[in-house]
Image: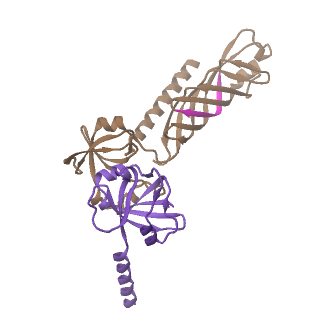
Amino acid sequence: MKTTLSILIVLSAWIFVNEIQYKVSLGKSPDCSGFNFCSLTKDNSLPKKENEVLAFINVNDEKHIEFSFIKRSISDQIFLKYFSTGTFILDEDFIISPEISEALKIDRNKLKLGKYQISDSYDKYVVVFTY
Amino acid sequence: MLHKWLVLLLFFLIATKGFNQTTNDKNRLYEFLVECPIYKCNIIGKIIDTTLLIAPPKSKFMLVDMKQDQCIIRFTVLNKKKSISNKSFSLEDYTTYTYYSITKAQLDFKASTVKKSDIDLVVGTVITPIKLRYNPFDFSKDISIGTTFGVKYTLNQEKQAAVDCLIGVGISSVSVDSFATHGRTIKNVDLLAFTSSIGIVLELGNAQVGVFLGFDFISNENKIKYDWIYQGKPWVSFGIGFSMFSFNLKK
């Protein structure tokens, strides 16, 4: 029993450590203004720019992809602009780069424009996008 | 006699209105209507960062504390399926909260309370100035006044569009004449009648349009005396501009 429990704990810790973090630059390229993703990269280093936030990404099904934005990586200005209304706005379709699409193992690479509900999940803000 | 009843009814309506306003004051969840300058502070209201931040319209916040002219707030993201209760808030880590300071004037003029449900209970006054009566057709200026209550369903909060389904009881002043009494009286006589009605009111901003269907009942004594032909028969009335006030169902 103890052995099984230990294996489960080690396995959970391994999964947690190895969960890929993504760095999301909020805003719309090229100047990162507006309401969209300026860039999306596979990077778990701490955000350096104010509009950068860290997120975990999970593919829920063939149509939905879940972004869990880590609260501690979100600056006050970014929270107020993008999260405080409870609605995350993508003002036009966002094209996911081939590298990220491959990492997420998804065929389609376009997040559809729209207004998405933000859910508060303890230390994360969760947004489920349609792709 | 009729005058006394009307005064008594108005007193009751004013008392009811006072009760509802007290209930509204308990709501601490707000939403900014326009952008608002805010400063980061601690929970006792001391400004800890003088950087000017701007809260966008529609951002939702809890009023944590109020000190003279200062309000301490914190922003909250509402989960659609999560009910707002003290139980759900206790699960959050309050040590991670960030507080902001705004003035009381900003709270009053730039924010409004957030409704937790699209359905409200409504209580109010409806005055139906003209009644259309049928069988035989007639129309009269028999004024009805009374308490109306029901439910209000908000169709669009931004456009302030809503539909109210109402039930009303009250009293009316009905004018009976020779025609309406089979000649039992020659001159016009004003009688007091009990009125019950149902109605639908459409609200769009400050405009309100409603249609009501109701029944008037004069007393048994007057019924025998005058044999009023519209006793218990339906009437239809249209109206604009009602005095309705509401309170949210999920408070």
Q: Residue at x 31, y 37 (%)?
A: B106
Kindly indicate which chain is depicted in purple in the rendered structure: A
Q: Residue at x 33, y 53 (%)?
A: A79
Looking at the picture, tell me which residue is in the foreground, B104 or A38.
A38
> Looking at the image, how many numbered discs can be counted on the residues?
0
Looking at the picture, tell me which residue is in the foreground, A20 or A33.
A33
* Residue B223 painted magenta: no
In the image, is B16 to the left or to the right of B111?
A: right
Q: Residue at x 48, y 39 (%)?
A: B158
Percent of width and height locating residue A77: 30, 50
In the image, is A123 to the left or to the right of A102?
A: left
Residue lying farthest to the top in this orientation: B187
Percent of width and height locating residue B82: 46, 57
Q: Colour of chain B?
A: brown
Query: In the rendered view, would you say B219 is above or below B108?
Result: above
Asked if one can make out residue B1 in the rendered structure from this viewpoint, the answer is no
Percent of width and height locating residue B224: 75, 22
Residue B53 location, quadrant:
top left
Looking at the picture, tell me which residue is in the foreground, B28 or A40.
A40
Looking at the rendering, the stretch of residues picked out in magenta corresponds to: B192-204
Residue B54 location, quadrant:
top left
Query: In the rendered view, would you say B24 is above or below A105?
Result: above
Percent of width and height locating residue B92: 35, 61
Q: Residue at x 29, y 52 (%)?
A: A76
